[in-house]
Image (cartoon, rainbow, N blue to C red):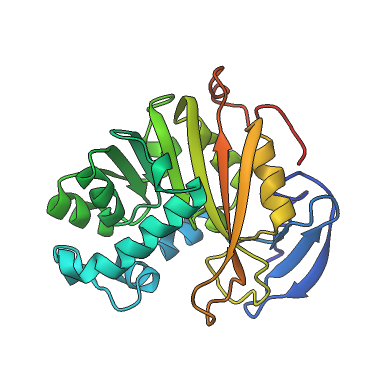
Amino acid sequence: MKCRLLPGCPVCGGAYEFLVLSPDKRRIAVCYECSHVFVADPISPEKLRNYFQGRPAFEGSYAGLTFEDIGNPSRWQSYLYCRMDDLCRGLGGPQELCPQMRIAEVGCLEGRFLAELAAQGHHVVGCDLNEDAVPLGRGHLGLDLRVGTVEECMPMWGCFDLVIALHVLQHCLCPRTELATWVRLLAPGGRLVVHVGLNRDDYESKWCMQYFTERSIRKLMGFFFDKIVFRKHPRPNPDEKDKDIGAVVGYLGPAGAPPPGHDGLIGQQT
């Protein structure tokens, strides 16, 4: 069966050339225009979604943690410290988390990080594809956690001061379309925080569809925000495949987000 090739770069739509075959025989390509690296013959949406189901996906995201740990707060202290540090560094400091913010997290899994934010007085909602982890987290934590993509289960356009998507975008088949749905969650003046791994070149992960560079993540965020702030910091674990973490904050203007059906706000090239 012949593989379907993407017609253009999933970030900017530009022409691309092939770089290499991945270990599972996927064609890795690079865009001439924005330097984005991506899987040019991706797996089906159904197959990708299946990767994020059940215990294996959960335990693959958390070293040493299992479903049985969801109800045990003491097991999460190290993770929550690192997660909060990641968010605050991306925002520019803990002072940027204003009191009682309305916060949505895309890719929340069991919702432990949202529970930490809720304990600080914020109003939180989360979504994730994992049909097992989300109900378990909802039962243990009592939070509004939903199964599905933002498009499928969070029709709350313009309701949030802050939307968080930490290490999610690289797993999306259509990052620009997906990002558009996240932007529409923001209230006028809201912020979107996106973290992605940068300059990864091992191409081993079957889950990773996008391999961002600083230039390509700036390009993508520039389609939706008239102001973006990019920060880069090295991976704390030298064994990680991503060489650096790119934290990008998009600031939505007073006009708010574009209506559904639009996959770009201003088309700014950065």
- Residue 161 vs 242, above or below: the answer is above
On the rendered structure, is 205 left or right of 75?
Answer: right
Q: Which residue sits at x=43%, y=24%?
A: 158
Please indicate, yes or no, whether residue 265 appears anywhere in the rendered image.
yes
Residue 7 is situated, as x and y percent measured from the top left of the image, at: 77, 49
Residue 131 is situated, as x and y percent measured from the top left of the image, at: 29, 55
Q: Quadrant of residue 70?
A: bottom left
Quadrant for the C terminus, please.
Answer: top right
Residue nearest the observer in this picture, 214 or 14: 214
On the rendered structure, is 261 left or right of 53?
Answer: right
Quadrant for the N terminus, please.
Answer: bottom right
Q: Which residue sits at x=66%, y=59%?
A: 212
Residue 50 is situated, as x and y percent measured from the top left of the image, at: 42, 61
Residue nearest the observer in this picture, 37 or 233: 233
Q: Which residue sits at x=56%, y=58%?
A: 196
On the rendered structure, is 47 left or right of 129?
Answer: right
Please indicate, yes or no, whether residue 44 appears anywhere in the rendered image.
no
Q: Which residue sits at x=16%, y=51%?
A: 141
Residue nearest the observer in this picture, 148 or 266: 266
- Residue 203 vs 270, above or below: the answer is below
Residue 83 is situated, as x and y percent measured from the top left of the image, at: 38, 59
Residue nearest the observer in this picture, 63 or 251: 251
